[in-house]
Amino acid sequence: MKAVETVEVSSDDGVTRIDRWFRRRYPHLSQGQIEKLIRTGQVRVDGARVKASDRVEPGQKVRVPPLPDAASRPPEGMSGKDVDYVRSLVMHKDADVIVLNKPAGLAVQGGTKTTRHLDALLPGLKFDAEARPRLVHRLDRDTSGCLVIARHPRAAAFLGEAFRDRDTDKIYWAIVLGSPRPKIGEIRGWMRKAPGVHDADREMMQQCVQTDEGAVHAITQYATLSEAAHEAAWMALRPVTGRTHQLRFHMAGIDHAVAGDPKYRCGRATPGGLEGQLQLHARAIRLPHPSGGELKVQAPLPPHMVAAFELLGFDEREARNPFEPFGQAK
């Protein structure tokens, strides 16, 4: 329903609570949606605001605001609150692609002890489409920022191939301990998952040689954007390859671990105020679009990194184009 309507309570409705009247008349709405409409004053009875527990009786007139179509009903197994939450993360949406600003702390997929994760929330991103959206890449649980979702199988196949063929370009921002020298460089090496660990929450990477079982080659480019008295540095990181924990592993490996990282540490002290949360954010992504052309999206910093920037005196306006430090200013 796209317009405001005035509906008279009928004798068949009897005397009932206004929220229950709504549920019977508009069964596709969740209780949360109804309560929000009432709480915000969009629903009125005889011109007056009401509470969800107020009763209506035959003859009264109810103002009914524009409502979502029945197709917008929360998917089975999801609450209206879950749908609202996952949709609040959307930065870009078109017919093929959705890009989310994933918050730190939300796992992308489930694990042994992980019951709430993004994959389970994807049905809430169907909107008017028939197909269930699909993940095409991952971010670590404690990493925030750009996460690309395909809206249908054709887009998933196209984007999956783009990630595998390294046709995508991702830029991360991090606060690391100390000040790397040289200020711009590249890290290369072989790494593998530590043997014997099968729980994603305990998964660790370790240095190895090419001939070791499970060895993969990893390349990270980095550029120092600003420094805070040699205690910490704001870095732009560009993963040429996309290995598990690659950026965190590489920065710790050159003795400049990402601040707040509980897994990959170095011998440097963490400045006060940076403990407890990983200071790593997928700032920007650029990729070919399934329908042609190029898609480029930037994710705002999460609250804990905004606070860290203020603490250290970093100004994100000094790096308006995240791709520029790597000679890709287009």
Image: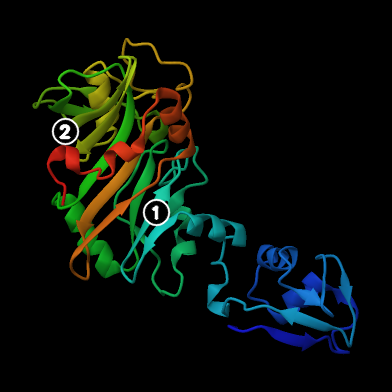
Q: Is residue 17 left or right of residue 253?
A: right
Q: Which mark is residue 100?
A: 1
Q: Which quarter of the rendering shows the N terminus?
A: bottom right
Residue 194 can be seen, yes or no: no
Q: Amino acid at mark 2?
A: Gln
Q: In which image quadrant can residue 50 be found?
A: bottom right
Which sits in the foreground, 189 or 305? 305
Which sits in the foreground, 210 or 28? 28
Q: Amino acid at mark 1?
A: Leu
Q: Is residue 192 left or right of residue 304?
A: left
Q: Which mark is residue 301?
A: none
Query: Relative to residue 201, is residue 287 depicted above or below?
Result: below
Relative image position of residue 320 (x, y in whole percent): 28, 44
Q: Which residue sits at x=37%, y=45%?
A: 145
Relative image position of residue 283 (x, y in whole percent): 32, 43
Reading the image, the residue beneath label 2 is 221
Q: In which image quadrant can residue 39 be found?
A: bottom right
Mark 2: few/some/many CA within 10 Å (<14, 14-19, 20+): many
